[in-house]
Image (cartoon, rainbow, N blue to C red):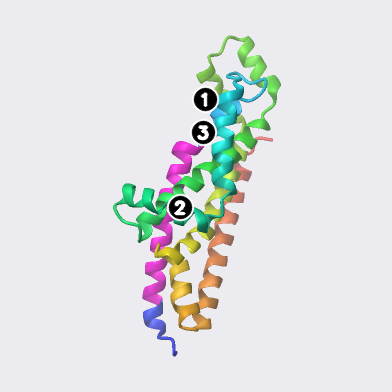
Amino acid sequence: METNYSVLLNDLIKAFNETFLMCGISLVAALVLGIPLGIFIFLTGKGMLWENKITNFIGCFIVNIVRSTPFIILLVVLLPFTQLVAGTAIGPVAASVPLAIVSVAFYARLVESSLHEVDKGVIEAATAFGASHLRIIKDVLLPESRAGLLRGFIITAISLVGYSAMAGIVGGGGIGDLAIRFGYYRYQTDVMFITVALIILLVQGMQSFGDYLVKKSDKK
């Protein structure tokens, strides 16, 4: 089938807008819920301020379940929940529901890893000076792990681009849906190559911008 490139341009703009919508909603969820969850898992760990084996196990268990489940399976499993939350099971907003769940779990683990890089001596010193737990989180943990948190956020954003492409399989829209409909079902390999090339450029741009932000924020 011959490709109409003027139509393709409009389809690409629409597809990328849908992808940005899906990823944007998911990244907001990662910031709002992923950071507190990562902090909670870190602080309830062994030797930490809120040490609690049971709550730490529950938090880690939930995060590990989400992260270990292939996203395409998670999409299908969460269809009833997606229908309940979004009112529909298709479209970019609906696809944002499982994407948000994945992004929260994914980023929470990266937040925890970044916090583990903070020198424990700094935390102990703040505790010795009588700083409250909230003050330690706000003035010690988050500032000291800022570079790692940014790095983890960029990794999460790039991963979501790949996950959002899979959402096209179940009618989520976006660049994945475009590549499947034209590049696979209609055997228009040029559309597939163009889509892949644009995704690569997008990811490279995100990574370069992320590296710049990390370099600017890293005090070490």
Q: Residue furthest left?
A: 87
Residue 153, relative to residue 176: is it above or below? above
Q: Which residue is mark 3?
A: 37
Magenta residues (range): 9-34
75 to the left or right of 143: left
Residue 167 spot, x, y in % from top left? 46, 61
Badge 2 element: helix
Badge 1 element: helix
Residue 79, relative to residue 28: is it above or below? below
Residue 5 spot, x, y in % from top left? 42, 83
Mark seen at residue 77: 2
Whole-angstrom CA distance, mark 2 to mark 3, is 23 Å
Mark seen at residue 138: 1
Instruction: Name the front one of labels 3 and 1.
Output: 3
Residue 205 falls in image quadrant:
bottom right
Q: Amino acid at mark 2?
A: Val
* Quarter that holds the C terminus: top right
Whole-angstrom CA distance, mark 3 to mark 1, is 15 Å
Crowd rating for badge 3 (residues with CA inside 10 Å; few <14, some 14–19, many 20+)? many
Residue 158 spot, x, y in % from top left? 55, 55
